[in-house]
Image (cartoon, rainbow, N blue to C red):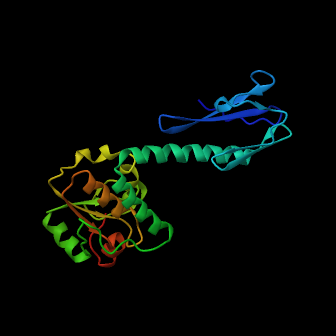
Amino acid sequence: MMSTKVSRKTTEYIDIGMINSGMTLAITKGNPDKEKYKPGGKHIKDHKLSKTTIGGLNLKRRNRTMKITGYLLIVSLAVFMMGGASFADQWSEDVVKQLDAITALEQGKQEMPASMEGVPVVNGEEVHKIWKSHKAAIIDTRNKTQYDTERIEGAHHLSSDDLIKDPALANSLDKEKEYIVYCNGVKCPRSPRAAIMLKSLGFKKVYWYREGMPDWKSKGYPTE
């Protein structure tokens, strides 16, 4: 349970504790015992408290008022750590390392790898040939808004952003069938992430359309 009300007149106390590999933020108004409060088992006298550090983040209290900025940063930190813990629990260490490498390229605004181990790369002409023969299902790994706006004709949707949080989303797919994953081109991280995750989940025939939607459209192939 989290209180979001911030008052200029009432001192508010923050206690952060790790619960179930996540982070819980608790805010208590007033002073519970009128002299000291015990966040995480430590006594802190409110009239002497000027700064508290949690995980390298400074929280400043001036004139018995908690700064809004500090509060928002703590909320963001809590949400981030909860998501991070959940993500790490879902995938093996090897998969996490591979996904981290993709994220590093994304943050550096670099192109995705030219190839990935165990995942054949296919070009536009090959994808179009497979698309016409219906030998493989084409998976759009972008977000739902992009998928709904325009996609390769007949493509199915499986957002890698959702799959990374919930591997069970792939349960509806037949692991013995062939799949081609794509997203928004050579700098888009979603399709390589999806390929990595699907392979780790036991899908044997996953192909990566690295050039993705921009290439498909430039060739005049069907979209919907």
Residue at the spot x=67%, y=35% of the render?
A: 4
Residue at the spot x=80%, y=38% of the render?
A: 49
Residue 211, above or below 140: below
Q: Nearer the viewer, residue 196 or 19?
A: 19
**Quadrant where the image shows the C terminus:** bottom left
Percent across and percent down for residue 197 are 31, 55
Q: Nearer the viewer, residue 40 or 126?
A: 40
Q: Residue furthest top?
A: 33
Residue 43, above or below 136: above
**Quadrant where the image shows the N terminus:** top right
Residue at the spot x=24%, y=72% of the render?
A: 122
Percent across and percent down for residue 216 are 30, 73
Percent across and percent down for residue 31 are 77, 25
Give residue 74's quadrant in the image.
top right
Drawn side of residue 80 relative to residue 103, left or right: right
Give residue 129's quadrant in the image.
bottom left
Drawn side of residue 99 relative to residue 63, left or right: left
Q: Is residue 30 visible?
A: no
Give residue 64's quadrant in the image.
top right
Drawn side of residue 7 relative to residue 83, left or right: right
Residue 184, above or below 45: below
Q: Is residue 114 visible?
A: yes
Percent across and percent down for residue 20 are 47, 34
